[in-house]
Amino acid sequence: MPENPLASLNTRVPRHLAIIMDGNGRWAKQRFLPRPAGHRAGVSAVRKTVERCIVEGIEVLTLFAFSSENWRRPAQEVSLLMELFIASLERETRKMHENGVRVRIIGERGAFAPVLQEKIREAEALTASNQRLNLVIAANYGGRWDITEAARQLAAEVESGGLKAADITNELIASRLSIADLPEPDLFIRTGGEQRISNFLLWQLAYTELYFTPLLWPDFDEEALTAALDSFSKRQRRFGYTGDQIENLTQT
């Protein structure tokens, strides 16, 4: 169940950072390269971001790797993305494990090829006990899907007699979501210049601080992440309270 959001009031570094990694294709196009080159460059940016999150003491990093809407892209690009996903899991999982990173994949896995599903299971099993950083990869994920799945679970419990409709609360719905055991995101970053959340963690982002940058994802480096973290550290998070109330709360 999500914690009381007031627990995050004095946090100058986000406990949970969520990122939409946008702009790989445009990065490649600007360099007259094929789109897959941009996606490969994006993997390098992921690696650097993970390393920096460990240094900063961030507990959770959630990355939107492939949305449920991305299947609409050209078939060749989707195929290459799936191949890159498999290759990245094969190449990076051992490194993540050695650095104490727990890898988790959220989303509907049934659409993935059996070999990819197996790689996901292997990565999660190998890193399951790690506690230095939770790396959550949202793949074939959508915020509406997440909420719908939670609703289905609760509906099944009502049908079985284990739950009454009147018992369903915000907290109960939240407890059935994909990352219910983790703190909700404190900071959301989207690269690439677009200013929308695109069906990503719709429920969980209710009180998250939003940060948009025109930088394309492969160009999102340590300096760019520092700028985002600095912006977050200067914000006053209110959670429905007034500014004066928050100042009093943080001084006690």
Image (cartoon, rainbow, N blue to C red):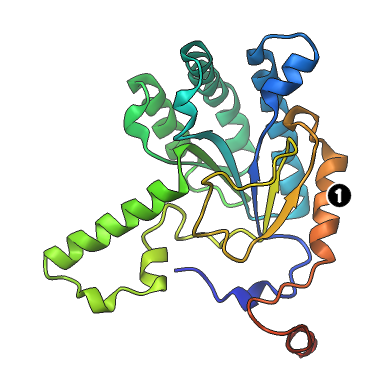
Quarter of the image with the C terminus in it: bottom right
- Say which quarter of the image contains residue 87: top right
**Tag 1's secondary structure?**
helix
Residue 86 in the figure: left or right of residue 15: left
- The image position of residue 47, as x and y in percent, is 70, 32
- The image position of residue 238, as x and y in percent, is 70, 77
Residue 107 in the figure: left or right of residue 195: left
Amino acid type at circle 1 is Ala
Q: Residue at x 45, y 60 (%)?
A: 180
In the image, residue 243 sits, relative to residue 155, either above or below, namely below
- The image position of residue 48, as x and y in percent, is 75, 34
Residue neighbourhood size for the residue with mark 1, other residues' Cα within 10 Å, grouped as few (<14), some (14–19), many (≥20): few
Instruction: Using the image as rendered, state which of residue 6 and residue 197 is in the foreground.
Output: 197
Instruction: Using the image as rendered, state which of residue 229 and residue 33 is in the foreground.
Output: 33
- The image position of residue 186, as x and y in percent, is 66, 61
Quarter of the image with the N terminus in it: bottom left
In the image, residue 214 sits, relative to residue 209, either above or below, namely above
Instruction: Using the image as rendered, state which of residue 244 and residue 85 is in the foreground.
Output: 244
In the image, residue 165 sits, relative to residue 205, either above or below, namely below
Q: Residue at x 56, y 76 (%)?
A: 4
Q: Residue at x 36, y 75 (%)?
A: 169
- Say which quarter of the image contains residue 106: top left
Give the total of numbered labels: 1
Residue 160 in the figure: left or right of residue 171: left
Q: Residue at x 41, y 72 (%)?
A: 171
Give the residue pinned by disc 1. Answer: 227
